[in-house]
Image (tube, grey):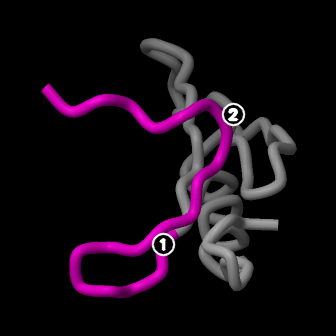
Amino acid sequence: MPTAPPPGIVAGMSEAGTPTVRVELALVPNAVPIQGWARNAVGAEHAFTGWLELLQILDAARMTEPAADGETP
């Protein structure tokens, strides 16, 4: 069984060599619409309600470039 990444956000490389950024996501069980929070690349938590808010958070996270040392600023 694979081990979980360390707490927080970890930037790395995919198997194909493409930089990636991890976003930690917590969901409220059985919430309608979907709701929860996401922790971004700098460790800030963002609450969301609905798919559109979640997509906005994910879109902002994917626009973050990993630092030269491989860690997200």
Question: In the image as oriented, which residue stretches furthest toward the top?
Answer: 29
For residue 18, what is the image quadrant?
A: bottom left
Q: Residue at x 32, y 73 (%)?
A: 14
Find out whether the residues at labels 2 and 1 contact each other: C-beta distance under 8 Å: no
Q: Does the magenta stretch include residue 7?
A: yes
Instruction: Write down the region rendered in magenta.
Output: 1-20
Q: Indicate the secondary structure of the residue bearing disc 2.
A: strand
Type of amino acid at the residue the image marks with label 1: Thr
Would you place residue 30 above or below residue 62 in this image?
above
Q: Where is residue 61 in the image (x, y as percent from the top left)?
A: 67, 67
Main secondary structure found in the magenta portion: loop
- Residue 21 as seen in the image, left or right of residue 73: left
Q: Position of residue 53 (x, y in %)?
A: 69, 54
For residue 8, what is the image quadrant?
A: top right
For residue 20, the mark is 1
Type of amino acid at the residue the image marks with label 2: Trp
Q: Which residue is drawn at 57% across and 64% down?
A: 11
* Of residues 20 and 34, the one drawn nearer to the viewer in this rendering: 20
